[in-house]
Image: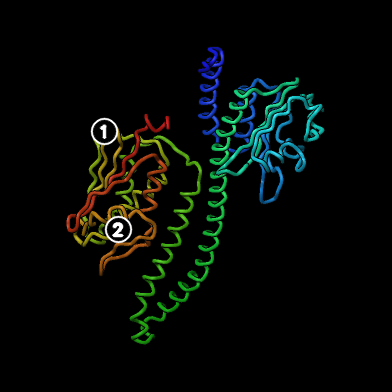
Amino acid sequence: MRTEDPKEEKVSQVHHKELLKISLAINAELDLKDLLDMIVRSTRELTGCEDASIVLWCPQEAYFKIGASTNIGSTVSHRVRQSGGASRWVVEHGQPVIVSDTRQDPFVANPMIPESGILAYTGVPIKQRGKVRGVLYALYQQVHKASSKELWVMEQAAAIAAVAIHNADLVDSLRDLNAFKSSMMQTMVHDLRNPLTALMGVFDILQLESGKLTPELEKWLPAIRRQTSRMEGLITGILNYEKMSSVEEIERNKFDLNVLARDTASYMEDMAAQKSHGLIIDLSSQSVWVYGNKIILREAIDNLVTNAIKYTPRGGRITIRTRMEDNDCVLEVEDTGPGIAPENHEKIFQQFVRLGTDGQEVGTGLGLSLVKLIIERHAGTITIESSPGEGAVFSLHLPPFEKAIVR
C-alpha cells in the first residue's frame, strides 16, 4: 500500500487550513465585486501563481458578464474570449483545463495572455447545482503543469467560491426585490390616498349639512367616518412599516427608558381620561440606559399604550412599567382589558391580523407587527402574557447600553 510522503501530507494540512480560513472570509462578504476580488487574491495565495482571475458566465445572455483579476481588475470579463477560448470550453464541458505552455495552447490563447507574460494556466469550473457558473484561473509566468494536488486545491477554492457567489447573488436579488416592493407599495398607497382624501372631503361637506339629510343617510354617517378613518390609519401604517423595514441603518443614541415611559404617559393622559382609565407609571428607581432611536421606540410604546386604552373597557387600568431584568432593559404595558387567548399570541404580531371581538374597535392589523419590527431592529424582543378575561402584559426587552454598542 502506498503511503503519502510526509512533506506532501504537511502541504495538504496547510492547504486545508488555508481553505478553511478563506472559506470563512469570503462567505462573510456579500458584495459581489468585493467578493470576486477576495477570491482571486486568495487563489493567488493558495497556488503561488503570479496572477489569478475569475470570470462569471451569464447563460441567459451567453457571455462572461463580470469578473476580477489580480492583474487587470474587472476588465478581465470584457477581454476574455466569449467563444472558442478556454473559458468557453470549461463552461460547455464542465471540466478543468491545464495548459502547461501557452506557446502550444490548443485553444489559441487570448492576446492578453502573452501581453501579460503568461506561459501557463490552470482553469477550473465554478459549479452551482451541476451547472457551470464561471471559471477560476491560476496563471503562471513560467512553463508549469499543475499537479493533482494543485488541481485539487483549485477545485476546492472554486467550490467555496460557488457558495459565496450564490449567497451574494441572493442578497442582490433580495435588494432588488425589496426596492421593487417598496416602489410598488408607495405607488399603491399614493393611489389609495388620493381618492380617500376626496372621499373625506365629501364626508366633511355632508356633516355640515347634518339635520338636513334624510334619516337613512344620517344613520350611515358614523359608519362612513369609522371606515374612512380606518383606511387612513391603514395607509399610514403601511407607510410606517415600509419605512422601518426598508431602512438599512437607524440613527441611535443613549437615553433613559424611564424618560421615554414618562413622556408617553404624559402624552396619553387625555386619551386615557376620555375612557375613565387610570394611567399608572411604575418606573425603575435607577436609570434604564438603552442605545437606540428614541423617536422610533417612542412610536412602538405609543402603539402599545394606545391599544391598551382602546381595547380596555371604561374604568380600566393601564400601567407603564420599567425595570432591569437579567441584564435586559424592560418596558411593560399592562392593561385590564379582555385579554388574548394563548393560541393567538403569535398571530397578533403578523401583518394585517385583527382579533377584535364584536362591539370592540378593530385596528388596521399593522400596529403590533410594526412594534415587533422596531424592537427587533434594536436587537430586542417582545413578549406577551395574557389569557381571556385577565388583561394583557406586553413586555419589550432591549439590550442595555453597554451591550448594545458592541452589536
Q: What's the residue at 37%, 44% (across, down)?
A: 375
Q: Position of residue 104 (x, y in %)?
A: 80, 28
For mark 2, give the secondary structure. helix
Mark 2 is surrounded, within 10 Å at the Cα level, by few (under 14), some (14 to 19) or many (20 or more) other residues, namely some
The image shows residue 344, relative to residue 143, as above or below, that is: below
Place of residue 349 in the rendered image (x, y in percent of width and height, measured from the top left):
34, 53
Mark yes or no: residue 319 visible: yes
| Crowding near the residue tagged with mark 1, few <14, some 14–19, many ≥20 C-alpha atoms within 10 Å | few
Residue 170 or residue 62, whichever sits in front: 62
Relative side of 5 to 210, left or right: right
Q: Which mark is residue 233?
A: none
Callout 1 secondary element: loop
Residue 326: mark in rendering? 1
* Quarter of the figure with residue 73: top right
Marks 1 and 2, the one that precedes in the sequence: 2
Q: CA distance from mark 1 to mark 2?
A: 34 Å
Observer-nearest of 137 and 39: 137
Q: Is residue 49 left or right of residue 205?
A: right
Q: Amino acid at mark 2?
A: Met
Measured from the top left, where is residue 108 in percent x and y? 81, 34
Q: Which mark is residue 271?
A: 2
For the C terminus, the image quarter is: top left
**Where 14 falls versus 340 (above or below)?**
above
Residue in the picture at 57% in, 43% down = 130
Q: Is residue 378 left or right of residue 9?
A: left
Q: Residue at x 74, y 30 (%)?
A: 72
Tell me the quarter of the picture where residue 45 sits.
top right
* Furthest residue in direction bottom, as rendered: 214
Q: Residue 15: x, y in percent?
A: 55, 21
Amino acid type, mark 1: Asp
Q: Quadrant of residue 42?
A: top right
Q: How many marks?
A: 2
